[in-house]
Amino acid sequence: MGLAFNQNSWWGVWIIEFLFIYFSSIIGFILLNHLYGFLPAILGSISWITILGFIIGGGNLAEEYGILFQFIILYLFFQSEYGKNNFKTGYLLIGVVSAFLFLLNPRFIGISSAILIYLAAITINYKNEVTSLKKIKYLISGFIALMIPLCIIFFIQGNFFDFIDQFIYYNTFRSSTDLFTKFLAFKHLLSAISAFNLVFIMLVSCIFAIIYIAQTKENNIYKKILIILLINLPIELFLISNIGTYKHYYMSLLPIISIFIGFFVYSIISYFSSFRNSKYNELLTILGKILAIVLIFGLCITPYVFILTFTQFSDCFKIITTNESTNNATYNGYGITYSKANTNDIYSLEIPSLQSRKYYFIKHKNIHQAIHFISENTTKEDYVLIFGAESVINFITQRKSPSRYVYQYPLYMQGYDDTRKDQEFLSDLAKNPPKLIIITNNPLTPFEKFSTIIENYTLVANDEDWKIYQKITQ
């Protein structure tokens, strides 16, 4: 959709990203405002958006778009449970939005699973609870209502079994990590959120939530939301630890974090506001709000983050304003591209997330030289095989890959790879012989397995770890 706006520009993608984050913040704020009031809603919203800024990286990630659907599901749950009478439409929509989340990434199904577990628990606890069964039925019906037409379309197009193979079967193998890897992922998760001291706030919020649930006899909407979050939190942690340790995976926690922070602020304000018979009631209320703000911005957003941010943008300004006769500096939205004249060196300076916690340069010399070589030695009708995981080269040069295995990861996935897929890959290269084969020496795709594909090729470029082979013309 973004490229349909303008294929030669990132603006279309940026606009879509902005709209998703904007509506996520609006829906999240409305939900928090309904639950806990204006101040908790403001602080909860500011907190999750601030955290997002430090884990979003270059953006355009599935997790980034999933936040909106997560907030929509929570808002629909709130409306359905708060109204009590008209839950049919709400739960049908929850099912439809859950299907969108599932199709975006199966790992995002945590929030919907938490709601189903909650409804199932009520049904089991209260054996004659018919309403909860109806809610489960409507939720599942909404999910199926989107999935069935989609599967029919895939089947008509002849790629339904590819959908099952790649979306479910492949992802199952990809997320099958050993216990030690899961432990490292969880440790990495704690490290990421402890950078904002959120562990303390989350722990206190969970304790407050458990106390509130235990003390509140009435099964009101506030209690239900907290129960859903307490069920969802371990589910999300499990799903994140299954897939890996990239920080952007933690975006699925942001709606949970925002509501817990809102509840945390609300609890503090409520405590100071409870002295209704005191002549200092108004003063205590004000002090409670001040304390809430100090806790959020003192514990969540540490002074280190402010120093880091100031340093980053200060260095950005220095580079942007550099005006040497031999250099050329341009600003490209997400980062700064700084190129030296008359050389093939190109440097990309990312406005960094917490992945580095410092301002750094990443050298893309090999990618830049590969793009330059392809542009000079091939036409748009030629096929170019990038062996590894750098499809960005195919995209920028507008050269097609000879095989659907643009990334060769599936051919190396233990338990998933098989002879049939290897033969398909080799058959594709025979049908669509690439003019160039670029070996990136990706450690996850060792070239030795398919070394025979360069038998009719000659080495024309060898820079550091990358090698470029060109087809020998007869």
Image: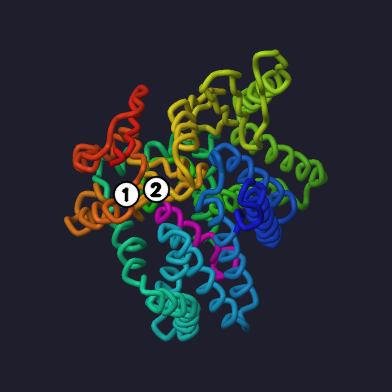
Q: Secondary structure at mark 1?
A: loop
Depth check, front residue: 77 or 433: 433
Depth check, front residue: 278 or 296: 296
Q: Could you say which disc has been placed on residue 383 in the image?
A: 2
Depth check, front residue: 149 or 344: 344
The span picked out in magenta is 216-236
Horizontal placement of 435 versus 248: left or right?
left
* As drawn, 228 above or below 10: below
Q: Secondary structure at mark 2?
A: loop
* As drawn, 327 above or below 211: above
Q: Residue most toward the left?
A: 419
For disc 2, the neighbor class at 10 Å (few under 14, some 14 to 19, many from 20) is: many
Horizontal placement of 107 versus 442: left or right?
right
Location of residue 336 by image quarter: top right
Q: Residue at horizontal 29%, vertical 56%? A: 431
Residue 454: x percent and y percent? 24, 39
Question: Looking at numbered disc 2 in the image, what kind of residue is underneath it?
Answer: Tyr
Q: Residues at badges 1 and 2 in contact (C-beta under 8 Å)?
A: yes
